[in-house]
Amino acid sequence: MTESNVASSAASNESAKYPENAMEKLISLCKRKGFVYQGSEIYGGLAGTWDYGPLGVALKQNIQNLWWKKFVLDREDMYGVDAAILMNQEVWKASGHVAGFADPLVEDLKTKKRFRADHLLEEVGVDPRGMTLEQMDALIKEKGVKSPDGNALGDVRQFNMMFKTNVGATQDENSISYLRPETAQGIFVNFKNVVDSFHPKMPFGIAQIGKAFRNEIAPRDFIFRVRELEQMEIEYFVRPEQWEEIFENLYAEQLAFLDEIGLDKAKIHKIVVPAADRAHYSKHSVDTEFDFPFGQKELLGLAYRTDFDLNAHMKASGVDISYFDESETDPEKRRFVPHCIEPTFGVGRLFLAILSSAYREDNLGEEPRAYLALSPRVAPILVAVSPLLKNKPQLVDKAREIYSKLRKEFPGRVMFDDNGNIGKRYRRQDEIGTPFCIVVDFDTVEKDAGVTVRHRDTGEQERVSVEGLVSILKKSQG
Ligand code: ATP
């Protein structure tokens, strides 16, 4: 850890003020309200897997749609792909994952349970960043580190995290395939296809959102470290001499995205990854870490992958995937293998950072409440519409009319809520992070006096004309 990193960690602990037991409360809220359920729950679960419920899907889709809009739809230099999860095993040999996609594993000699050696070192106050396998092994022995069950540990060794499977009816060496551990390779193997179809000018990027799988030794911290995950990745192709400037631009774009989805800036930290900790393909990496309730951890990454991947695939496949730049005046420089910068975002970790950032407890009108201060851009439900009383047909009809009108503007993000009294409805909506509640009362129908709009964070209410609702809600989308 460099000095500046130490400083930022210390500062982060100061700023990371979470309510007591915030994580337990969040997990319970997620289950109760239909954000996230344990995977295969009725069978006792499957470690490292989680299922997203109706509100979770909505929040996740909002994150993905905003990302796709910012990084693909709003730009002229980005192309989207959706590659298959199963790929020819040669892809993973060429990319270096078969040989090197591994984490340091150590086994409890009694229970045979396996743990991440670097995590055990962190727990005894050692920073394992930059350490070799041998150094970790020596430290574990020197410090007498035991397993969490209190037993002696074996030697530290490498554990490959790819899920292996066989494709087709035969189970031999040739039928081996892997569930992709990153979406990136689906982009590299389609580089030539996209160039041939679109003739993009340098620099340009290819983006993809999709599932990836990692057989994590110790999945933990709710959806932070899972075995089935979702990534949003861009491979941005550049001339080698352009990489530094574009790297900085992409880093700024990553931060801008975090701001757009409403993450607390004080909880975000830049970590320049030491050479020994960089992935095998990277020449320079900057991780963005976030103060989760369980500590400061990696949220997303940015890596300068050089021409490592395109070169590796060119060599292994025998296919020429170099780029020909017609606009280049120097004939020597016209054909080249582009270098690549990779901004990578984990959807689940963003989801968790958003929820952690948003979780609040306060007293509103003398009553304690727990709520999610979600940005209106990502909140699963943007607005709830209610009649003041559910047994007054004129109120219900008007509320239904407004509800239908708003639904057309904001599909899937408007809820009709006439359950219980108004106070209870507000609390229910606060808990799932709905920024606005609209109430139709007698003045609405009898005097055409608009509706009440109640704001989640302050509890303040204002009177708004029915015609003005759409524009207020649109404005909240930024
Ligand atoms: P870590 O050091 O936490 O294991 P990593 O450095 O291996 O992460 P990358 O290979 O850079 O992660 O993956 C890119 C992004 O994918 C990460 O920044 C993270 O958001 C997400 N990610 C990686 N592994 C997991 C996982 N097991 N569960 C959830 N998200 C993950």
Image (cartoon, helix red, strand yellow):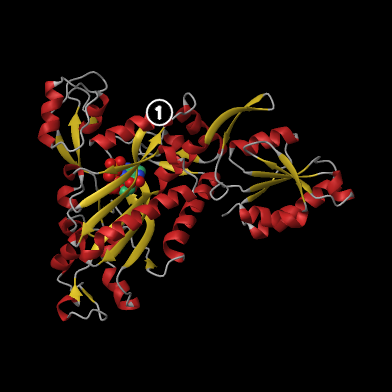
Residue 7 image offset from top left, x and y in percent? 30, 33
106 in relation to 86, above or below: above
Q: Quadrant of ligand 1?
A: top left
Q: Position of residue 57 (x, y in %)?
A: 51, 48
* The quarter of the displayed image where residue 289 is located: top left
Label 1: few (<14), some (14–19) or many (≥20) C-alpha neighbours in 10 Å: few
Give above or below for 178 relative to 216. below
x%, y% of residue 471?
68, 57
Foreground: 94 or 77? 77
Tag 1: amino acid: Glu
Split into 4 quadrants, where in the image is the N terminus? top left
Q: Residue at x 76, y 52 (%)?
A: 400
- Which is nearer the eye, 142 or 82? 142
Residue lying at 65% horizontally and 53% vertically, measured from the top left:
473
Residue 116 shows in the view: no
Q: Is residue 347 visible?
A: yes
- Residue 396 placement, left or right of 94: right
Q: Quadrant of the C terminus?
A: bottom right
Residue 120, image x and y in percent? 24, 27
Q: Secondary structure at mark 1?
A: helix
Query: Horizontal placement of 224 versus 180: left or right?
Result: right
What residue does disc 1 label? 14
In which image quadrant can residue 441 be found? top right
User: Which residue occupies 39% across, 55% down?
Assistant: 253
- Relative placement, left or right, of 7 versus 329 is right
Question: Viewer-proximal residue, 440 or 343?
Answer: 343
* Mark 1 residue CB less than 8 A from any atom of ligand 1: no
Q: Is residue 46 left or right of residue 94?
A: right
Report the number of numbered marks: 1
